[in-house]
Amino acid sequence: MNRRRLLAALSTAGAGALAGCGALGGGTDPAAETAGTDGTDEATTAPSLPYEGPSPRALLDAPRGLRLRNAAGAFRFVTVALDHGDRQVFLDSRGVPPATLVTYDGLVRRRDDYRVVVETDAGGRHRREWSPTPWTGDLLVTLDRDVTSRATATCGPECGPGDPTADSDRALVLDNPADDPVTVDVRLGPSFDPDLARRYQVPGVGRLSLPVSRWSDDYPVRLAYGDRTVRHEWRTADGDRIYADVSGPPRLRCSNAHRDLVVVNRPAREREVGLRIEADGELAVERSLVLGPERRRAFANDVPPAGEYGFRIRTDDGLDESFSTSICPAPGRMLVNVDERAAVVTVRGAEPETVVDGRT
């Protein structure tokens, strides 16, 4: 059984017993999905896209699709399956380089419940029930330390679906990892004359992206949800996108992905290095390393996203330093350079993201 058929079978297993490698699901509407005159089961053929399915049906105003982002920092072979009931709607397997966004536009137009299953060659597997609505856009799947997904929505002057993952636009991104939707009051700009002051609803297990057309250094941002209020001065150093988690205690960050960590021993002698990193006040990394002369150790996807990091770095020859970042670090690899008398942390810029059309 090849890999594509295996995942398709797994993704439709909940619909009924499988009769073998060819049992990829069958249609249930006798008018639309009956056996062909030549004996071929038309239910196993891929439907035309965007998928509308059998009648009766309710249609969305515009087709929705999937976005697959590889933020893992390494090449991944990925298989994506999209099912409607026991009918396979879309299936794709491909290699995805790091810092790549694969777009699968215009997959479905029928307003209904779908099942999305994503598998990677690194052992990741993610299954999600997806129900696109008029007020949500594409489903964003992210490959990082784990495979996760977010229903997305975009709001400008009018609230509605759009392209919430386009990194070329300046945007405030609100993430809601909780199951229930969250109502958020957003104010951008000075309190006496705001550029935007509106109330939005962030979908459960979802993301809302607000394009920001007017922006300058030290740009005021205020978010209020539940009994919590977040105030932030958006600085040029923060970059063109800031992320806010609105499911619990306030948390702002300038990157949404885990970072690679590299620890470098600069002197020409072996040293023991103890490293402790806090992310937004919580312990994130604690390592004790023995590094050879002028050697380095790298750890992939080791540092979680945060708006502020605190560091303590100690060595067996007496170095002991503690400090924290004063700006929201841009996306990229984090380097801890341990010299003779000091430790310095730098963040390398992330690779520009490549966009690939997954339907070609």
Image: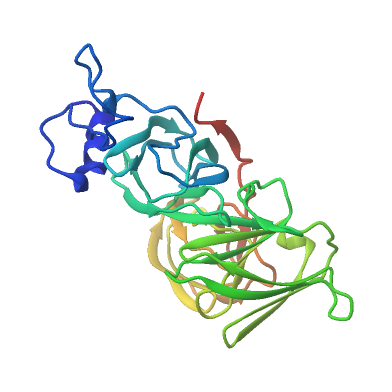
Identify which residue is drawn at 23% across, 32% down: 24
Identify which residue is drawn at 26% across, 40% down: 86
Identify which residue is drawn at 44% across, 41% down: 74
- Residue 126 visible in the snapshot: yes
Give x and y (percent) for residue 204.
47, 66
Give x and y (percent) for residue 234.
76, 68
Identify which residue is drawn at 60% across, 35% down: 354
Give x and y (percent) for residue 106.
53, 36
Q: Nearer the viewer, residue 182 or 53?
A: 53
Query: Which quarter of the figure has residue 244?
Result: bottom right
Q: How is the image coloured?
A: rainbow
Left or right: 76 in relation to 172: left
Residue 230 drawn above or below residue 304: below
Q: Nearer the viewer, residue 150 or 325?
A: 150
Give x and y (percent) for residue 230.
66, 80
Q: Nearer the viewer, residue 108 or 277?
A: 108
- Placement of the N terminus among the 4 image quadrants: top left
Residue 271 drawn above or below residue 66: below
Identity of the residue furthest to the right in this view: 193
- Residue 266 visible in the snapshot: no
Left or right: 172 in relation to 259: right
Left or right: 247 in relation to 290: right
Residue 132 drawn above or below residue 303: above
Q: Nearer the viewer, residue 345 or 59?
A: 59
Identity of the residue furthest to the bottom in this view: 227
